[in-house]
Image (tube, grey):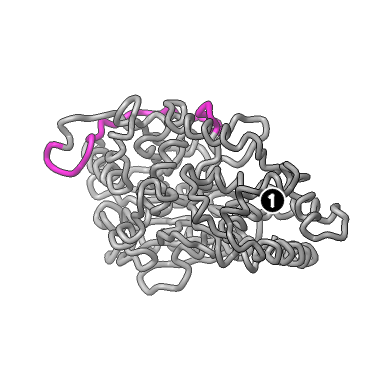
Amino acid sequence: MYFRTISTVLLGIFGLAMAQIPLTFDLSKDQIFVQGNWYNKDGSNGKSVVTPHAFFTQCMHHENASGCDTTWSQRYWVNTNYYQPGRPIFIELAGEWDAAGDVDGGYWHAYARQYNAMLIVLEHRFYGQSFPVQNPAVRDLWLMTSQLALADAAKFITDFTANNNLNGTSWVSFGCSYGANLAAWFKLKYPNHVKAAVSSSGPVEALYDYPGYMKTVSEVVQEIDDVCHDKCTTHSAAWKHWLMGVKILVIFTRRLMTYFHHSSRNCFFITQFSLWCHSVDWDGISKEQMFLSLGMNVWADNAPSGKVTTACNMLGQIDGDDNVQIYGDFMEAMGQDGGCSSMKKRMEEREKFLMSQEAWQSGAAGWDWQTWDVYGQGCGRYGSQIATSNAYYGGKDLDSRCIIFVHGTWDPWHTQGVTTPEADNTVIVVPRTEHCADNGNPTTPEMAAAQAQIMTQIGTYLSDPMC
């Protein structure tokens, strides 16, 4: 794909995490793709669970004094394998997933071992088994906000401290992707509840038009296989030339099936785009949005190197003289046939599933909503909260201190995060590493050095009276 062109026009749809957090595509599972994340429709998360969970009595909301008149049960996990009395507590603010098993894995165990810390994972409201309202409906979505999730964490820390005689204990918030935003935002909004925060791959700035995602993917392609990158440029230039010749897109769209003799190979981009947005305005759809589908599904991922390698290998096997046809053959070989004849049915099935209780249990329905609430997405279905979110949290200009921001240059979301050095916080950018990669064991010397820096900086902040 012509990433140099796509990167300037791609819609910024927030997606989430790798490491021990959200799922990737699995042909053996019945899955749904929602705003950057794959979810198993049966609600499973694929993680092994060792530590048993407990439930915390949480307030329905925290808007006023009546917020705790109604309560619900929020799930959490505690791991004390390394803990010694008087030492810190590390709490993961889980994001848009079932958090079972999170406390049992991840590189934060190394930090806990170093500082004899307790590990706690707090599950986000409306995910996993932490539902304020059973059988939620649209009328209940005012209860599903990042602000309430932060208030939940504050309430949990306050009560857990009091109930376990832990006054004076230092807490550190951790998180990955959206959870990384929560970890940083928690230090911002509740600075006295935690001494520090470790924010792994947090895209804290809300954007609608986000070219940085595909720009990063393009850079990954070039670094992994420069020959492949040149081929992408050549084939995409042909697609661009062809599409730019279409003066009236609505006429083009309506005649697509006839024009291509009903070839599903050549209409995949219309179908794939329509799956991103339930209410497509065909009169207003842009050529840029078509390019989204030409590049996103095959090349892009929160950890793009695997997809890039597979795609480059396949593209190298496709022969021909017509660059448009070569890329069409490549997309078909990659399984992106578009299914034009079943487009309406697929859209209806997706919409129906997102309205089901199974979608809530899997996490898909909740994340579909939250991409509007936090990031202002939703293709016009909900409106835009971008300005509101950035005004409330500060975007990349968080007015806080003692936060460790960690990003990888191969993470397509990293340019939405804090990546420039700051006096009051720590910024660590790791070359050739992907989304939330610091949550796992180091695979490169650069990652090992970054995790050693995180380890040291946690100790520095724990002993800093200004934190």
Q: Quadrant of residue 241?
A: bottom right
- Which residue is more in the foreground, 243 or 463? 243
Q: Residue 425 location, x and y as percent?
A: 38, 67
**Mark 1: which amino acid?**
Lys
- The residue shown at (48%, 50%) is 281
Say if the magenta span includes residue 47.
Answer: yes
Provide residue 417's location: percent of width, then percent of height. 46, 63
Residue 303 seen in the current view? no
Q: Residue furthest left?
A: 65
> Magenta residues: mostly which secondary structure?
loop
- Number of numbered discs visible in the structure rendering: 1
Most foreground residue, 95 or 348: 348
- Which quadrant would residue 23 be assigned to in this image? top right
Tell whether position 447 is magenta.
no
Residue 189 image offset from top left, x and y in percent: 26, 56
- Give whichever of 437, 59 is nearer the camera: 59
Left of 31 or right of it: where is 280? Answer: left
Quadrant (top left/top right/bottom left/bottom right) for the N terminus: bottom right
In the picture of the structure, the residue carrying the numbered disc 1 is 307
Task: Name the residue: 58% across, 60% down.
Answer: 248
Residue 165 percent location from the top left of the image: 23, 39
Start-end of magenta stretch: 40-66
Image-quadrant location for residue 323: bottom right
Identity of the residue drawn at 42% across and 30% down:
355
Give the answer, above or below, for where 330 lies relative to 138: below
Secondary-structure class at tag 1: helix
Relative to 438, 321 lies left or right: right
Characterize the local packing of mark 1: few (<14), some (14-19) or many (20 or more) Cα atoms within 10 angstroms. some
Q: Nearer the viewer, residue 138 or 148?
A: 138
Residue appearing at x 79%, y 49% in the figure: 329
